[in-house]
Image (tube, rainbow, N blue to C red):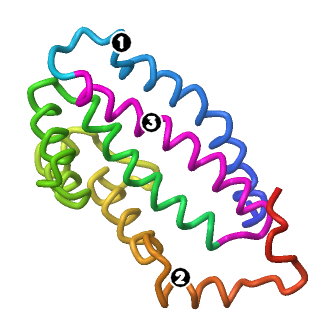
Amino acid sequence: MTHALHEELWSRLGEELLLPLTQAALAELDPQRTQATGELNLRAIPYLATLHLLDCMAVSVQANACGRHAVAICLARQCVEALTLLDVGCQPHAYAAELLSAWEAGRMTQGQLRARLEKDVWLRYGHGLWEEPWQNFFANLARAVQPYAHYSPELKNWQFSILDYELAPHQLK
């Protein structure tokens, strides 16, 4: 399969799966419907993170299609962080509440959340898309987009290397 066909297939499958998967996550994490006990503000974190994931993915795809690849990769970084919180919310309440409370209070970073999930949860997820353990896949994904979390020299250099000088600066529709 050529690279273009593989990329097209990947995009189509991603688009077909994104909405049903996020709808299922939203139904599962809805703080008004969940049977979990605990503070509403903690139960709302994974739900709101899922909404953020969906919005970031949609705008990232749109930005990428318009040639705004640097914006698209920054939004991909946001997706990794939102996906981490979504995953925490899918864990048993006692485990999730501890992590969400620490995250909300600023006592735990995104990296620390991922480290806990890797240690406590991801080992039982099995293999991912490329037959690698989930913790390896997610660590590689997080590491790949980390330089683009902020406007940095790495992001500037990447942006400059793919800049389309024919496009107007604010052509994103």
Which numbered tag is attached to residue 50? 3
Q: Amino acid at mark 3?
A: Thr
Q: Are marks 1 and 2 in contact (CB under 8 Å)?
A: no
- Residue 153: % across, % down: 49, 90
Say which label, 3 or 2, has the lower sequence index.
Answer: 3
- Mark 1, other Cα within 10 Å: few <14 / some 14–19 / many ≥20: few
On-image quarter of the N terminus: bottom right
User: What is the three-letter code of the residue carrying label 2?
Assistant: Leu
Give coordinates of residue 52: x percent, y percent. 49, 42
Q: Earlier in the sequence, mark 3 or mark 1?
A: 1
Q: Secondary structure at mark 1?
A: loop
Left-right relation of 147 to 42: right
* Residue beneath disc 2: 155
Q: Magenta segment, which residues?
A: 40-69
Q: CA distance from mark 1 to mark 2?
A: 39 Å
Q: Residue at x 25, y 37 (%)?
A: 88
